[in-house]
Amino acid sequence: MKWFYVLVSVCVLSVGCMGNQVVPNSRPGWVINPAIPGAVAAVGYSASQIKGYSAQRSMAIQAALDEIARQMGVTISNTTLIGKKSDGTSVSSEMETWSFSTVDNKKVTAHVKESWLDPSTEALYVWMVAK
């Protein structure tokens, strides 16, 4: 009877420990390799934004569009202005970003093929393909 209790205890502990296994991050393959044969594709990335998901998605889409435009021969120039203000008791920071494109009669249009929010970092990845 003693062996029965030992066997049951080992089984219960084994099953209990199985629930604590770490499942590897299932990152989609397109995050690393966005290429599609015969098409122009790119991945845009954005970290979590203080202004929320829509701002995060907008930044990721803009990054992907910029990369698609580069692949199509459009010149892209991004400028970022970062400023800090202090009133002695608190510090605030502001950031403004401009994206300039030099286009030689080229129109860059693309659609979102897929998106993925990394659960561990809350970073958003957007996979876009040029039309």
Image (cartoon, grey):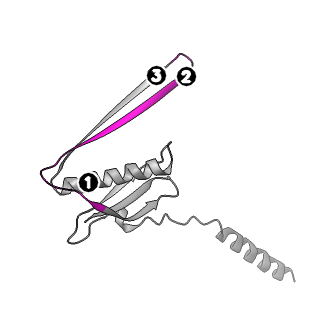
Q: Looking at the image, is 96 positioned above or below residue 87?
A: below
Within 10 angstroms of label 2, few (less than 14), some, or many (20 or more) residues?
Answer: few
Can residue 32 be seen in this snapshot? no
User: Of marks 3 and 2, which one's residue comes earlier in the chain?
Assistant: 3
Q: Looking at the image, is 104 positioned above or below residue 7?
A: above
Kind of residue sitting beneath label 3: Lys
Instruction: Identify the residue position indicated by label 1 in the image.
Output: 67
Instruction: Identify the residue position indicated by label 3 in the image.
Output: 85
Within 10 angstroms of label 3, few (less than 14), some, or many (20 or more) residues?
Answer: few
Residue placed furthest toward the top? 88
Q: Looking at the image, is 2 positioned above or below residue 118?
A: below
Q: Residue at x 51, y 47 (%)?
A: 52
Q: Residue at x 26, y 66 (%)?
A: 35
Give SS at disc 1: helix
Give SS at disc 2: loop
Image spot of residue 88 (x, y percent):
54, 16
- Highlighted magenta segment, given as a residue range: 87-110
Kind of residue sitting beneath label 2: Ser
Q: CA distance from mark 1 to mark 2?
A: 38 Å
Instruction: Identify the residue position indicated by label 2 in the image.
Output: 90
